[in-house]
Image (spheres, rainbow, N blue to C red):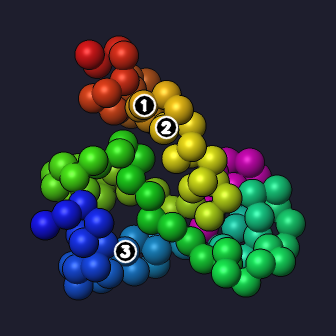
């Protein structure tokens, strides 16, 4: 099964909705001090493009097809499309995620600290 067809499974669709009901706002927007349920841009302004009014369930550590990482709900966060694009672009440039666990240590096995 390709890493992309995982997103088409009933299990993912159900789990995704379950996650969104528990975390219904963008995590990064909340850290910036406002509540974005998918109707705002990352600048906190009304999203004028209706095709970008939604929320993404993002994998904090990129799963790269790793099933354990893919299904680990502790590795999921809700993001608005703007923040999702920003986070993913940074990861692609660097090749790893900077997300840290509660102990402050980088979570991504590809982070230089874990190599
Ligand atoms: Zn956001």
Badge 1 local density, few (<14 within 10 Å), some, or many (20+)?
some
Q: Nearer the viewer, residue 71 or 110?
A: 110
> Which residue in the structure is indicated by mark 3?
16
**Residue 102 position (above or below residue 84):** above
Picture coordinates of residue 113, whole percent (x, y): 35, 15
Name the one closer to the observer, 9 or 37. Answer: 9
* Residue 106 seen in the current view: yes
**Where are the magenta residues, as a range?**
25-34
Q: Is residue 26 magenta?
A: yes
Residue at point 73%, 84% (across, down): 50
Q: Can you say which quadrant of the picture contains the C terminus? A: top left
Task: Name the quadrant containing residue 2.
Answer: bottom left
Q: Quick check: 77 left or right of 32? A: left
**In the rendered structure, which disc, 3 or 1, sits on the residue that comes first in sequence?**
3
Q: Position of residue 22 (x, y in %)?
A: 45, 72
Q: Residues within 10 Å of mark 3 (few under 14, many from 20)?
A: some
Disc 1 and disc 2: Cα gap in Å?
Answer: 5 Å
Q: Residue 51's spot in the image, x, y percent?
A: 67, 81
Residue 70, disc: none
Q: Earlier in the sequence, mark 2 or mark 3?
A: 3
Foreground mark, 3 or 1? 1
Q: Quadrant of residue 81?
A: bottom right
Q: For numbered disc 3, what is the local secondary structure?
A: helix
Residue at 42% from the left image edge and 31% from the top image edge: 95
> What residue is disc 1 on?
95
Q: Does 114 sit left or right of 51 as displayed?
A: left
Pick the quarter of the image with the N terminus.
bottom left
Residue sitting at 76 percent across and 52 percent down?
Answer: 33
Compared with 5, 59 (above or below) is above
Numbered mark located on residue 91 in the image:
2
Is 53 situated above or below 95?
below
């Amino acid at each position: 099964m390709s890493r992309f067809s995982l997103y088409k499974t009933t299990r993912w669709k159900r789990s995704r909705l379950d996650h969104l009901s528990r975390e219904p706002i963008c995590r990064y927007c909340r850290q910036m001090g406002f509540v974005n349920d998918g109707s705002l841009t990352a600048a906190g302004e009304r999203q004028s493009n209706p095709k970008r009014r939604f929320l993404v369930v993002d994998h904090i550590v990129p799963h790269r097809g790793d099933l354990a990482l893919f299904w680990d709900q502790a590795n999921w966060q809700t993001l608005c499309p703007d923040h999702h694009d920003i986070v993913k672009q940074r990861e692609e440039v660097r090749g790893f995620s900077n997300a840290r666990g509660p102990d402050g240590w980088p979570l991504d096995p590809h982070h230089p600290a874990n190599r």
